[in-house]
Amino acid sequence: MVKFADIKGFIFDLDGVIADTSSFHTTAWHQLADKVGAPWSQELEDGLKGISRMDSLEMILNAGGLSNNYTDEEKQALAEEKNTNYLALVDQMTPADIFPGVKEFLESLEDNHYKISLASASKNGPRVLAKLGLTDYFPNVVDPSTLMKGKPDPEIYIKGAEILGLKPEECIGIEDAAAGIEAINAANETSIGIGSKQLLSEADMVFANTEELTLDNIKANMN
Ligand code: BG6
Ligand code: MG
């Protein structure tokens, strides 16, 4: 692992790291799976985390052997319907929904002159940040519509370092999903998992929740 002293930037996932929007995605996808008659499982739920909208839809349809039952236009309409249901939940959020410790962590990063970027697969990232009152912390957001490949491909985390003018080795990526940790590791950055040690076993370090996400705790895990 690189040394803490070499770190210059932090690249954040959004859903499930900054706020509980991951559960909103789950709710909206589960609703859609029920509608099309695809079976839901814990494995599918975990596997969808970090995955782009259209790839998520394919995974759900495949779970029910339904992928060939829909045209591309019908798939677009299904994804749009899920997004409408998801946004209805997002629009109820306020800054009180930021996960505990996240704002304090962002402030400590600014105080210590670290660079910050967002590497969320979500096209709704800027809208979620606005609802949470966090837009000003994230002048650098990777636009997921510019990506050739979604997580677990490293592209989004490589771009997350590039927009900061940093080398991947100088960056730490923070994720709640196994696909995201895989992406960070493949980008040659240091990975922090937030959540279950079992699900995020490939991460360089795992914190159970965002309250534990502090520069002191990260430093203690690196030196
Ligand atoms: C990721 C979420 O951050 O964004 C996934 O973990 C979601 O669950 C993906 O499917 C795409 O989000 P959106 O908002 O563009 O549909
Ligand atoms: Mg996430």
Image (cartoon, rainbow, N blue to C red):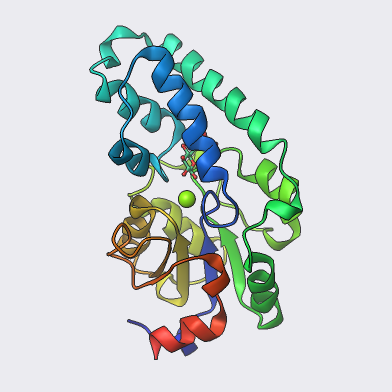
Q: Is residue 90 above or below residue 170?
A: above
Q: Is residue 203 above or below residue 139?
A: below
Depth check: 71 or 213 in front?
Answer: 213
Q: Is residue 215 left or right of residue 157?
A: right
Residue 25, visible in the rendered structure = yes
Q: Is residue 165 above or below residue 178?
A: below
Residue at 51% of width from left, 28% of height from top?
28
- How many marks on residues? 0
Depth check: 55 or 158 in front?
Answer: 55
Residue at the farthest left position: 65
Give the quarter of the figure containing the C terminus.
Answer: bottom left
Q: Quadrant of residue 116?
A: bottom right
Depth check: 114 or 211 in front?
Answer: 211
Residue at 51% of width from left, 44% of height from top?
22
Q: Is residue 55 above or below residue 35?
A: below
Residue at 53% of width from left, 48% of height from top?
15
The x and y percentages for residue 4 are 46, 86
Residue 122, visible in the rendered structure = no
The x and y percentages for residue 216 are 54, 86
The x and y percentages for residue 3 are 40, 87
Q: Is residue 136 left or right of residue 23?
A: right
Give the quarter of the figure containing the N terminus.
Answer: bottom left
The x and y percentages for residue 115 are 61, 71
Q: Quadrant of residue 139?
A: bottom right
Depth check: 184 or 149 in front?
Answer: 184
